[in-house]
Amino acid sequence: MSIPSSHPVQLPRILLGALIALGLSLPILAASAWPESEDGAIGAGFTQQGIEELDAAMRKIVADQDVAGMVWLLARNGKVATFDSAGLARIDDNAPITRDSLFRIYSMTKPVTGVALMMLYEEGLWEFDDPVSKHVPEFANLKVMVSYDEEGNVELAEPSRQPTMRELLNHSAGFGYGLSGQDPVNAAFRQKRALASNDLGQLIENIADIPLLYEPGEAWYYSIAVDIQGYIVQELSGMRFGEFLEQRMFQPLGMNDTRFYVREEDRGRFAEVHHWDEERGSLVQRPHRTDRPTYLDPGRLESGGGGLVSSTRDYARFLQMLVNEGELDGVRMLTPESVRIMRTNSLRDELLLGGGAGRPGAPGIGFGVDFAVIFDPQAANSPQGAGTYYWSGAAGTWFWIDPVHDMFWVGMIQAQGARRPGAANMRNVARDIIYDSLMRQGSSD
């Protein structure tokens, strides 16, 4: 397993914890050169033709107006095969997207929250079989929705047991979210404006009396669980969630562009979200939401489920830390065992990804700690290695890590809403070219 060679400062995580316990400030690491300097296709174990095809395909996706702009990075064995960009960050002022652009990563925040919680697991502050209410007492009296009708009548019952931390981590605890669903539970999340809470404490207050959608462990349902995880990190650490991430993760990893808001001096680097306008026959820039604080507001909700802004470089460093099983540039975030726990499916066979309550899950795909996991690539119809884990964000950002081939991909875009008719499936396009190149390189070795 290869690890990037730059070592600006070596700070074992136990030392980081000791500094924080003493109330001392952590040093801000000088930015590592990795992944700024590319090693090229051959150095990373791909064919030159394959990487040229990959770059050309991503540029075509931008040229076809499937997205306004994109930044992409592929690394293997700690070597950067390609790190490139194309298109615009903002159509309205014709600002080019660059490798330095900042993105709303939305649900790609979730794995960051999972790593933070696993750091506290290693410190013995929680266990997988703990009831969630041990760490969030407000959830001690949760009810479960048994049935409801069109008149708004809801039947509630005591759950057979309390949801556990393991279920909170793999979205089988039974919580709703409010992002979709017309049932009374998800409607309550929207009515209470849970995701527009002022802070994590208020978020917990807002959702504490909303019933569970399902009995704990009986279905996989994408939920507010990771925002709850962020609150638990805050409570167990005694630090504001954003402060914990900054001091315990972002500074040590040299992730200097990742936070819950955009600094005023970085505003010009911030990419905007676009969608396809059928009447104009082109992409248009989406207006900002007015029902929540702006991304320029440092007081925004520190949402562990979807609040971070990051750069491609920063997120690549986070992913390479995971590829290296918890370490980067001499700084260890997690033990290899903890990373392996995170990337191991913990759902029962009858659940899988999206399964439960009479509906089948996605074949060959389960869920670990804030990642989906491809545990059976053949069943999942994927060329990726067994154990590949991945996730994405609401504005289209996506990544995957293949531990069999010691590599990862991250694609950064900002797109929500309607897409151009006939738009390419960019995720499959990138994946298929990458694995085809890998196989061709392997056959020529």
Image (spheres, helix red, strand yellow):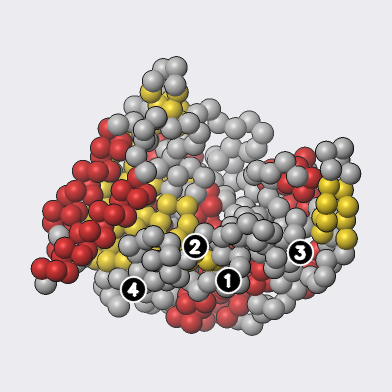
- Residue identified by numbered label 4: 404
Figure check: 92 above or below 107: above
Query: Which sits earlier in the primary sequence, circle 4 or circle 2?
Result: 2
Depth check, front residue: 403 or 184 = 184
Q: Is residue 123 above or below residue 362?
A: below
* Comes first in the chain, label 1 or label 3: 3
**Residue topped by disc 3:** 215
Q: Residue at x 83, y 66 (%)?
A: 159
Badge 4: how crowded within 10 Å, few (<14), some, or many (20+)?
few
Residue wearing tag 1 = 349
Q: Secondary structure at mark 4?
A: loop
Q: Residue 302 location, x and y as percent?
A: 62, 52
Identify residue type, mark 4: Val
Q: Earlier in the sequence, mark 1 or mark 4?
A: 1
Q: Separation of disc 2 and disc 1 at Cα?
A: 10 Å
User: In what quadrant of the picture does the C terminus appear?
Assistant: bottom left
Mark 3 against mark 4, which lies toward the viewer?
3
Is label 1 or label 3 in front? 1
30 sits left or right of 202 in the view: left
Residue type highlighted by circle 1: Asp
Q: Which mark is residue 363?
A: 2
Q: Are marks 3 and 4 in contact (CB under 8 Å)?
A: no
Q: Are marks 1 and 4 in contact (CB under 8 Å)?
A: no
Name the N-terminal-most of marks 2 and 1.
1
Binning the other alpha carbons within 10 Å of mark 1 as few (below 14), some (14 to 19) or many (20 upward) gives some
Closer to the chain start, of discs 3 and 4, is 3
Callout 2 amino acid: Pro
Query: Which residue lies at the image location 50% right of the left edge and 74% below the top edge?
Result: 344
